[in-house]
């Protein structure tokens, strides 16, 4: 994470935009956005961001932690946070407070609104902080790179123990154990290990099913380290792959490389998606590609921009995204190849160091 003045600068950026949105303050309670603006890593907090001040509200569990992590004012609530937030809004005589509608529960919104002065209103502001978060600073890029490297090392260590007859759940547990041993706080998402015909399920959960000889195994995994996520998918084959597996794998690999080759500033995310689909169509496999080509990642495993058919975002230097086309054929299995990529001034850099070859076990 950035030094303490980095958080100050981020808050100043948001504060400078309040007047243009006709807001007296911005109320932020979504954990990744709180971490982005303050460094606070607790599970319960709200930030009241003013033009020239910022107050983090949290509860007594985080009294010591907040004062260690945060370089703005901290207020420890003795009861429900919203009571202290409402009291502060009233005392400061604020009239228009922005809030994140998709990030706030109806209960919190209704309870807070009921306690505000009559002339005070909550104004919906969607995606503002997420838009700022899309462009990763050099320190953020380094943290993502570190997470990616930890993830890849965990994959190599765990897969060295993989064998026919091993349960999907056991390999998933080994992957997560290895990433934690290497410094990750936790998996960035629930690790996917799916073998044989189950590999055709894009978001399969690991089961007690055994990985049988002569079958594909998809491994989709990510680490969270220092708050930042990584994401990678690689394929295993238990034995010697037949011609159909090799051909399908080649198609997905060519699609992924074509999409990566398109990544550069100014290119629309839809154009990146189209390049992957164009290659798969040449193999007659485009209809077996049932999800988007990728997504942004950072403090969350899925964050803007989305790389899909109908998305209109344009890539900018500093964005960190995944490129992950896949093909899913019922009764045969699925193949997905995924890297974490950072957009540079002239193109992109693949952060994932792991070989993209189909690994035979």
Image: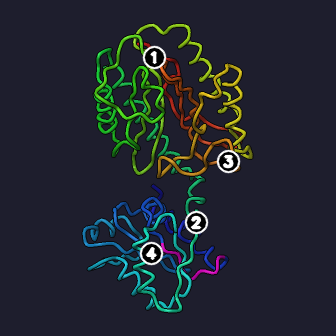
Q: CA distance from mark 1 to mark 3?
A: 33 Å
Q: From the image, tell me which residue sits under label 2.
A: 126
| Left or right: 14 as drawn, with respect to 197 | right
Residue 146, image quadrant:
top left
Residue located at (52% from left, 75% from top): 26
Which SS class for mark 4? helix
Distance CA(mark 2)–CA(mark 1):
43 Å
Counting from the top left corner in percent of width and height, residue 41 is at 37, 60
Q: Name the one closer to the observer, 181 or 298.
A: 298
Crowding near the residue tagged with mark 3, few <14, some 14–19, many ≥20 C-alpha atoms within 10 Å: some
Give the residue pinned by disc 4: 109
Assign the N terminus to one quadrant of the image: bottom left
Q: Label 2: how many residues lie within 10 Å, few (<14), some (14-19) or many (20+)? A: some
| Residue at image mark 3 | 311
Residue 333, which numbered label? none
Marks 4 and 2, the one that precedes in the sequence: 4
Q: CA distance from mark 3 to mark 4?
A: 30 Å
Relative to 216, does residue 344 appear above or below in the rendering? below
* Highlighted magenta segment, given as a residue range: 21-27
């Amino acid at each position: 994470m950035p030094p303490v003045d980095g958080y100050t600068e981020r808050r100043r950026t948001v504060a400078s935009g309040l007047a243009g949105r006709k807001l007296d303050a911005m109320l932020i309670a979504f954990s990744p956005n709180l971490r982005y603006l303050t460094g606070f890593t607790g599970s319960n907090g709200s930030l009241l961001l003013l033009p020239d001040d910022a107050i983090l509200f949290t509860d007594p569990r985080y009294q010591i932690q907040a004062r260690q992590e945060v370089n703005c004012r901290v207020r420890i609530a003795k009861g429900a946070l919203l009571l202290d937030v409402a009291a502060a809004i009233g005392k400061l005589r604020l009239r228009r407070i922005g809030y994140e509608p998709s990030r706030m529960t109806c209960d919190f919104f209704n309870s807070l609104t009921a306690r505000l002065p009559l002339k005070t209103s909550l104004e919906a502001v969607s995606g503002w902080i997420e838009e700022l978060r899309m462009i990763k600073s050099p320190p953020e890029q380094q943290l993502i790179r570190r997470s990616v490297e930890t993830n890849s090392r965990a994959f190599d260590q765990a897969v060295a123990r993989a064998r026919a007859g091993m349960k999907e759940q056991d390999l998933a547990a080994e992957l997560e154990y290895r990433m934690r041993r290497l410094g990750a706080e936790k998996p960035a998402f629930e690790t996917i290990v799916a073998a044989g015909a189950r590999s055709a399920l894009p978001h399969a959960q690991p089961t007690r099913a055994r990985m049988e000889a002569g079958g594909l195994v998809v491994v989709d995994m990510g680490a969270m380290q220092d708050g930042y996520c990584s994401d990678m998918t690689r394929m295993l084959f238990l034995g010697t792959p037949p011609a159909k597996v090799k051909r399908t794998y080649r198609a997905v690999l060519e699609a992924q490389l074509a999409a990566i080759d398109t990544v550069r500033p100014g290119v629309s995310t839809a154009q990146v998606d189209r390049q992957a689909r164009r290659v798969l169509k040449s193999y007659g496999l485009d209809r077996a590609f049932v999800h988007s080509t990728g997504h942004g990642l950072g403090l969350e495993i899925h964050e803007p921009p989305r790389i899909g058919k109908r998305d209109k975002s344009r890539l900018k230097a500093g964005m960190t995204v995944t490129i992950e086309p896949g093909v899913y054929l019922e009764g045969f299995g699925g193949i997905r190849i995924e890297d974490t990529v950072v957009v540079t001034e002239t193109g992109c850099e693949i952060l994932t160091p792991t070989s993209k070859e189909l690994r035979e076990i």
